[in-house]
Image: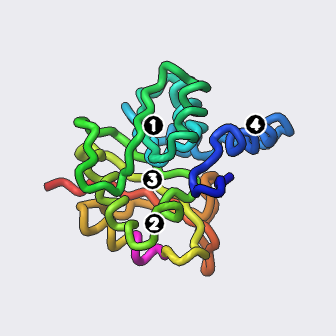
Amino acid sequence: MVTPAGSWDGDDYQARFDDLAAAGVDVHGEVRFVLAFSPPSVLDAGCGTGRVAVELHRRGVDVVGVDRDPSMLATARSRAPSVPFRQADMADEGFDLGRTFGLVVLAGNVPLFTPPGTEAALVAGCARHVAPGGLLVAGFSLDRGYQLESYDSHCARVGLALVERWSTWDRDPLGDDPAYAVSVHRRVPG
C-alpha cells in the first residue's frame, strides 16, 4: 500500500500475502517458475518485502534482493536477516552490485512501478547483472501501458533474446489477447 508521501508501507503490503497464504492460496508461483531453471544464483530485482527472495533462500538458493523503497526493505530484512537486501534503484545507470547472477527475476509487476519512461533503464540495469548464458525473467500486466513489443525491444538492446513466454507463472499458454505475461530472455553470447 502506498502512503501519502508516495512510499510503501512494507508491513501492510506483506500482510496481504500473509493473509492469502493463511487462507491456503499458493503465493509462491514465481519461486517454482524460477526454480525450474535451477539457477546457481538469483537477483530478485524490485524485491519489495522479499516474498520471492526469502522463499528462494529458504530453498537453498544464493539470492540477493534489491528494492528502492526503504519500508519494503525493512520488512524484508525483518523477515530474513540472513538474506542480503540492498536499497537501490535498478534503473540508475550507475547501479552495480559487482557481480552477475544465473537468473534475474522481476516478479510482481516491477516494470509498472518504475517511473514512466524508465523501463528501458530498468531492463538495462537488470541485464548488467545477468551472467553469460543467464536469464532475465519478468512477469507483468499488459494493461498499464508497457507492452511486450517495448519490453522485447529493451531486452534486445542489451543483449537479451526471448526464450519463452507464458500468461502465468504456472506456464499457461499466452493466447491471443493476454492480460499478463511472463517472459524469459537469455543473455546472448558475444
* Secondary-structure class at tag 4: helix
Q: Residue at x 41, y 40 (%)?
A: 87
Nearest the viewer among 144 and 3 is 3
Tag nearer the camera, 1 or 2: 2
Reading the image, the residue beneath label 2 is 115
Mark 2 and mark 3 lie on one chain; the one further toward the N terminus is 2
Which residue is situated farthest in the front direction here? 5
Write down the region rendered in magenta. Answer: 147-151
- Percent x, y for residue 38? 44, 35
Mark 4 and mark 3 lie on one chain; the one further toward the N terminus is 4
Q: Residue at x 74, y 39 (%)?
A: 15
Amino acid type assigned to the residue bearing label 4 in the image: Asp
Q: Are marks 3 and 1 in contact (CB under 8 Å)?
A: no
Left or right side of 51 for 123: left
Amino acid type assigned to the residue bearing label 2 in the image: Pro
Q: Residue at x 34, y 67 (%)?
A: 120
Query: Is residue 31 at least partly visible in the picture?
Result: no
Could you tell me which quadrant the C terminus lies in?
bottom left
* Secondary-structure class at tag 1: strand
Q: Residue at x 59, y 67 (%)?
A: 141
Reading the image, the residue beneath label 3 is 137
* Secondary-structure class at tag 2: loop
Mark 1 and mark 2 lie on one chain; the one further toward the N terminus is 1
Q: Is residue 53 above or below residue 129?
A: above
Question: In the rendering, which numbered label is found on residue 65?
Answer: 1
Tag nearer the camera, 2 or 3: 2
Nearest the viewer among 111 and 131 is 111
Question: In the rendering, which numbered label is found on residue 139?
Answer: none
Crowd around label 3: few <14 · some 14–19 · many ≥20 (10 Å): many
Tag nearer the camera, 4 or 3: 4
- Percent x, y for residue 28? 65, 40
C-alpha span from label 4 to label 3: 24 Å
